[in-house]
Amino acid sequence: MARRFRVFVVLIALLLVAGPASAQEKQYELSNFDVTVHVRPDGHYEVEESITYDFQRGSFSRAYRSVVQENGALRDVRVTSPDTPVDSVRTGEADGTPQVRWAFPDRSAPAQFDVRYVLENAIYERGGRNVVGLDVMADEAVVPTRDVDVRVTLPAAFDLRRDQIELDPSDEGTVRREAGRLAVSFQRDRVEAGDDFEVEVTFPKQIEGEFLPTGAQILVGLFLVLLGGTAGGVAAWRWRGPRPEVTARRPPPDLDLPTAVALLGKHDGQAFLAVLFDLARRGHVTLRHDQEAGMLGSSDVVRLDVHPDRTDLSDFEQRCVDELRGYDTLDDFWEDTASFRSDEMSDRRAELYDRGWMRSHAWRSTLLMVGAVAAMLGGFVAIATGESALRFYLLFAGMGASLGGFLAATRRYTWTQDGARRAVALRSYIDHEKSEVERLRETDPARAAERLVDALPWLLLHDEVSKSWIEETKEALDAADAVPTLPDGFVSLVAGEENAGAPVAAFLPVVVVMGAVESSSAGAAGAAGAAGAAGAAGGAGAAGAA
């Protein structure tokens, strides 16, 4: 019994392996591909195709053909063959391209299929000319295709001359007169798998067709978008508020860290990180770098040890310290105090308006946003309800007006003269401190480390200050003899670097605490503000079989 079971399992395994292998053995090409499009005076296309499927390996029972043009309603579909019965003719789509699909008895010998259908209202117009645009391979050939002939006949009612016809590609097409009408022919000996074959026949406008923009019209449309965007950009620049030239070597005396964050438009999280580092620098909080074991290994954490001297704290700092007392790690504090932080910073932003440092343009921005949305919708409605050059221009004008409106609406809040003077002074100060730290690295690394830690709460408001920037000071200390004198508010509970000298060992807690903060949810929040053969359903491509 056990032996029979093993034999059964082996047979099932062989079938599972053989199934995909046999499917992969199917191979075919298209040995002849003829397409004839009769353009009718009403703009409909009568399409006749004769396709020879050269089945070379395997057995086939289904085939499909993508129509020559996506535009136009597909009807009156028929598929016949002189070589095999055809049944189950149906239509569908693959990647947005209409397809004709049919079935036939299993077959391994070559077979010819004749596909006929009508595309209603398929003709285009562009720049005063009608356009017959055909994607013969419907995006790309699925398999190598030989002897491709494309023929387009124009009705005698159009009364066209040969010199009025323009072809693309011009070197592969010919025009001749047959029975009172013009016939255009294109021919290629071979189209490789993956290659396209598109042809275009244009002539003076004879009938209304679906609008296609000319190159010049596209350029005008893009100019309208650029014009609208430029107007909005100019408005945003003119409304940016005053920008006085101020040089400062210390922060404005009436500007504390959370107010500075609000004034510079930084993320709320940066205010609390800056205050936390300032409390650690002044000895009110100790930030201890540690590691916690988890399911995916150990991770860095920042533990909080709060021991404030309330006589040296502002009201904001006292509230922060009171909140910090209930948490062991910075991540815990960050995850539970979103409402507290939001309320505190809302008060700070309101204070900016009370002091006259910021001005609100909320109504203007709201109206601009509404106008931008209306302009965009208007443009889309214009092109969706009709087709013409005017509607095309309205679409792009709407896009340009929308872009300009959105750009101008960004000036929702601006500085007053007093606010701008303080903001520019603050930026001057933190730029100066960053430059001084970088200068001291070259001459006195220990002093650079001391100055960095002393100014770190403010430097955190600089877009270019991060752990990697701080590590450059650590690298400078590798070659230094002097040991920096740093506050005790930064501690690492994890074994330090082996063979690290005394200067590096003194500075290392600052680096690892900064790194742990950056990798925490608090750091992430702060950083966010700083800155072929087809199956039954058919396949993509010109024509295929399965």
Image (spheres, rainbow, N blue to C red):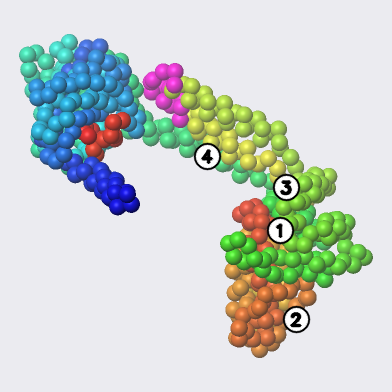
Q: Which residue is mark 3?
A: 415
Q: Does the stretch in magenta take in 16?
A: no
Q: Look at label 3 and name its amino acid.
A: Trp
The Cα atoms of the two marked residues, 3 and 4, are separated by 23 Å
Q: Earlier in the sequence, mark 2 or mark 3?
A: 3
Q: Secondary structure at mark 4?
A: helix
- Front tag of 4 and 1: 1
Of the pair 42 and 304, the residue shown nearer to us:
304
Q: Earlier in the sequence, mark 3 or mark 4?
A: 4
| Spot occupied by residue 450 in the image (x, y as percentages of width and height) | 72, 77
The Cα atoms of the two marked residues, 2 and 3, are separated by 39 Å
Q: Contact, CB < 8 Å: mark 2 with mark 3?
A: no
Q: Which residue is mark 2?
A: 485
The C terminus lies in quadrant: top left
Q: Look at label 2 and name its amino acid.
A: Thr
Label the magenta part by its dominant secondary structure: helix
The Cα atoms of the two marked residues, 2 and 1, are separated by 29 Å
Q: Which residue is mark 1?
A: 331
Quadrant of residue 434 within the rendered picture: bottom right
The Cα atoms of the two marked residues, 2 and 4, are separated by 53 Å
The part of the chain drawn in magenta is: 384-396
Q: Residues within 10 Å of mark 1 (few under 14, many from 20)?
A: some
Of the pair 298 and 146, the residue shown nearer to us:
298
- Front tag of 2 and 1: 1
Q: Which residue is mark 4?
A: 230
